[in-house]
Amino acid sequence: MAHNRWRVAAAIVFLIGCAGGTVAQTFPTKPLRLVVPYPPGGITDILGRALGQALGERLGQSIVIDNRAGANGAIGSEVVARAAPDGYSLVVGASSTHVLNPLLYKLGYDPVRDFSPIGLIAATPLVLVVSTQVPAATVPELVSWLKARAGQVNFGSYGNASASHLAGELFKSMAGIQMTHVPYRGAAPAQAAIVGGEIALMFSDMSAMELVRAGRLRALALTGLRRTATFPEIPTVAEAGVPGFEVSGWFAIYGPAGIAKPVVDRLSGDLAKIIESVEIRKRLVGLGLEPASGGPADLAALMRRDREKWIRVIAEAKIKVD
């Protein structure tokens, strides 16, 4: 009897393996849907459309872009979390939708349990900018200036609990300084507030570089792990005086949990080849992004690291959302 049970179990495993191989060989047999959880025209939409076209060409099927905006990306993400796990519904996820939002809001999905990570697409650092009235040209000079004015200086962000806000709180903690947070409704109003002298500094998205080029703001450092190809002359915060500091937003592709591994492998492999292509790399750099490669395991590990870091920062800074 025991031998029979083992034969049955072995047969089942064999059949599953054969089925998986068949799925990988035939996938896809129809158009795919790529959900962009933000409105048309934004950077996530532009990125999704460029990748959708390239991925469709590699897969031999069209990819339909489905904009499902709302709740800072949560609505579109939940649509894919609830989709059939067959590989035909994907979403352009981000560090905000899969790490920050779940830490701050009650959502209809779990960022780990409800998704199959496919692969990384791109990363983007923030830039530490200061008012031209701040007498600091380097990070160490800024830290010294802030320490001499403990609690007297305001830093801005483009919203409470935003990546901009969290980066400022992490900087406070790691540099041993005290500042007061002032949230604004978006990057542009916060940048205008620095230019107008309302606040001294902020960690901004890369749109602030237009004001830097115009001489209205001063860029001291970027927040990524390494210098970027777009702005190689700007050091990272870590190399400029705060070792270990790193804040990077990122974009990735996810599907619903339960997609067969051969299908995940097919999608992940094609995505990696697309990111390696000269055309897509130029497109990403043109959008102010850094091409980022990494398969499902790399993406899952990145999520874990970011989650641990931001849980700590949110708790220490007592950050709450309305």
Image (cartoon, helix red, strand yellow):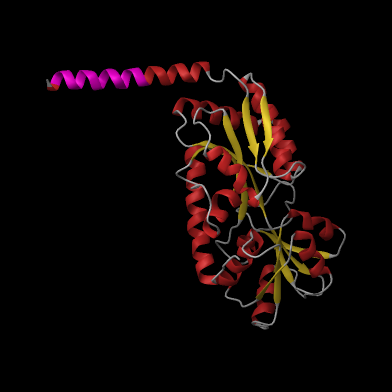
Asked whether, in this view, residue 287 is left or right of residue 36, the answer is right
Q: Taking the image as drawn, is residue 293 in sight? A: no
In the shown orientation, is residue 202 left or right of residue 103?
right
Q: In which quarter of the image is the N terminus?
A: top left
Magenta region's main secondary structure? helix
Instruction: Name which residue lies at 60% across and 48% down.
Output: 74
**Segment colored magenta:** 3-16
Name of the residue lying farthest toward the right:
214
Image location of residue 284, percent across then percent down: 71, 40
Residue 184 place in picture, x, y as percent: 73, 66
Q: Can residue 126 be seen in this view?
A: yes
Residue 204 image offset from top left, x and y in percent = 72, 60
Q: Nearer the viewer, residue 146 or 46?
A: 46
Q: Which residue lies furthest to the left in this view?
A: 1
> Which quadrant of the view contains residue 212?
bottom right
What residue sits 51% from the left and 36% below the top? Answer: 256
Residue 49 falls in which quadrant of the image? top right
Query: Is 147 on the left-hand or right-hand side of 210?
Result: left
Q: Residue 182 or 265: which is nearer the viewer?
A: 182
The residue at the point 67 percent across, 83 percent down is: 148
Quadrant housing the C terminus: bottom right
Snapshot quadrant of residue 42: top right
Q: Is residue 7 magenta?
A: yes
| 302 lies above or below 194 | above
